[in-house]
């Protein structure tokens, strides 16, 4: 293949981590990994395989990251044992980046915050939402625990180069419309398998205008469309975001003008309204103002999708001076200790407490039906999380409605699925 072949940003990053000058979709490659991630659910399985293989040390103590976030603070004996296993492995192998307890947070918010993820990196994680890091111009994708074990030993991963799809967003967004609505609109358009094993490249003036937090939200949910990764071309906002977070050098890749895409979609964000994904698929999207009167029992504002300070500020804007409906449990989950402290210092906790909200420590918790807000039979929740499959947050007969933080906050106040406009905002 000619080195002059035009490539997408995804293809360039993968190629840069192989011994080939250029790659194309469908190529099978062995790629060097910059960062390998495991959590308290997936890492113990990988550790078992690592030890069964007879390995004694990881390929690089600085490039393996372990985060206890799913069932933490430990909810039971089993989850406590899982985290103990992770801690002991990190100690035995001299892994630098082990996060548990007071320095831990939701992994996909924590790693960018700590400067562990940089543009041009190739990152694999034993968690499907590893695709979040594409917001920083990295190729990041989820793998199984067996693959994580192999990477921890060798520092390499087997990959099939994905085809790329381009999503161009332009225009000016309506009030209360966020990056969460952009990605829900996209998934609603192409379906939960519309980007199957494809790189979802997000671009356009409306995307450039997004904060890094907004881009992280969009990249996070690429997997909900079946994507291999979600990715953004890094710009000056990335440089500003990373300043002071990392001293490691990075390379900013961009797609060639004549790179090939299997599909190109364009969206005028001015035509997107605040949305809600109804049960039981992220693609079952409707404008929230079109949703019938559906009473709810719980609201969760948090997760690796929308637990960042920008999200908490947006929710507080709706909740200030208002209270959650007496029939609604309002749960707020800052995604990291830094976000927790920032929300506290900005007075957001006072707003949430005055609204009768429950403030949780950083955890994935209810998003996966783990703890800190599991649903009973017949209950409904509006959540800023990323999945609303059957039984995702509790009983198989419960229902999950996905939304942005403003919609979730308005729903908490009104006791039903509703947007800010229903409050006259």
Image (cartoon, grey):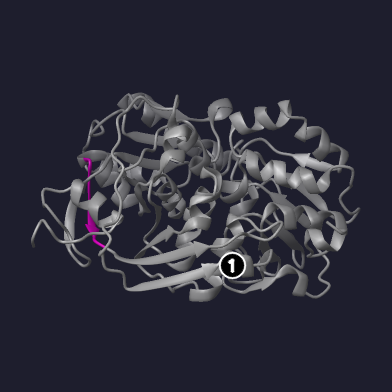
Identify the element where label 1 is drawn: loop
Q: Report x, y in % for residue 351.
A: 82, 37
Q: Check the picture and name the quadrant holding the C terminus.
A: bottom right
Q: Which residues are magenta?
A: 155-161
Q: Residue at x 56, y 73 (%)?
A: 188
Q: Check the picture and name the quadrant holding the N terminus.
A: bottom left
Relative to residue 215, is residue 204 depicted above or below? below
Magenta segment main secondary structure: strand
State whether residue 23 appears in this view: yes
Q: Answer with the quarter of the image where residue 270 lies.
A: bottom right
Q: Answer with the quarter of the image where residue 116 lies.
A: top left
Q: Residue at x 59, y 45 (%)?
A: 364
The number of numbered discs placed on residues in the rendered structure image is: 1
View extreme (left): residue: 2
The residue tagged 1 is 389
Q: Report x, y in % for residue 350.
A: 82, 33
Was residue 160 drawn as part of the magenta stretch in this picture? yes
Residue in front for this viewpoint, 181 or 258: 258
Q: Report x, y in % for residue 223.
A: 45, 61
Q: Residue at x 32, y 28 (%)?
A: 248
Was residue 163 drawn as part of the magenta stretch in this picture? no
Q: Report x, y in % for residue 339.
A: 62, 33
Residue in front for this viewpoint, 289 or 408: 289
State whether residue 415 appears in this view: no
């Amino acid at each position: 293949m000619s080195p002059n072949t035009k490539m997408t940003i995804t293809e360039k990053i993968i190629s840069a981590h192989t011994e080939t000058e250029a790659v194309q979709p469908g190529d099978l490659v062995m790629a060097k990994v910059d960062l390998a991630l495991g959590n308290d659910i997936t890492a113990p399985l990988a550790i078992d395989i690592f030890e069964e293989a007879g390995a004694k040390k990881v390929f690089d103590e600085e490039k393996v990251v372990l985060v206890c976030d799913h069932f933490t603070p430990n909810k039971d004996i089993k989850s406590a044992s899982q985290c103990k296993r992770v801690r002991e492995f990190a100690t035995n192998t001299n892994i630098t980046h082990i996060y548990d307890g007071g320095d831990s947070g939701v992994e996909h918010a924590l790693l960018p915050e700590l400067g562990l993820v940089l543009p041009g990196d190739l990152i694999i994680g034993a968690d499907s939402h590893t695709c979040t890091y594409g917001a920083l111009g990295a190729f990041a994708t989820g793998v199984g625990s067996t693959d994580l074990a192999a990477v921890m030993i060798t520092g390499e991963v087997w990959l099939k180069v994905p085809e790329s799809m381009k999503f161009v967003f332009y225009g000016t967004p309506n009030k209360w419309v966020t990056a969460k609505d952009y990605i829900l609109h996209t998934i609603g358009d192409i379906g939960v398998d519309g980007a199957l094993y494809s790189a979802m490249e997000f671009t356009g003036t409306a995307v450039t205008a997004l904060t890094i937090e907004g881009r992280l939200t969009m990249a996070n949910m690429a997997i909900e469309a079946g994507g291999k990764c979600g990715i953004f071309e890094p710009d000056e906002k990335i440089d500003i975001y990373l300043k002071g977070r990392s001293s490691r050098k990075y390379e900013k890749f961009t797609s060639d003008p004549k790179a090939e895409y299997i599909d190109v979609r364009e969206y005028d964000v001015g035509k997107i309204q605040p949305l809600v994904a109804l049960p039981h698929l992220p693609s079952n999207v409707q404008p929230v103002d079109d949703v019938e009167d559906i009473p709810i029992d719980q609201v969760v504002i948090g997760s690796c999708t929308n637990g960042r300070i920008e999200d908490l500020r947006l929710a507080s804007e709706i909740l200030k001076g208002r209270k959650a409906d007496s029939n609604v449990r309002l749960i707020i989950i800052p995604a990291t200790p830094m976000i927790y402290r920032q929300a506290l210092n900005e007075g957001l906790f006072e707003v949430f407490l005055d609204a009768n909200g429950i403030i949780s420590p950083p955890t994935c918790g209810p998003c996966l039906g783990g703890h800190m807000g599991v649903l009973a039979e017949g209950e409904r929740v509006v959540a800023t999380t990323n999945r609303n499959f059957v039984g995702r947050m509790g009983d198989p007969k419960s229902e999950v409605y996905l939304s942005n933080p403003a919609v979730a906050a308005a729903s908490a106040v009104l006791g039903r699925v509703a947007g800010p406009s229903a409050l006259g905002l």
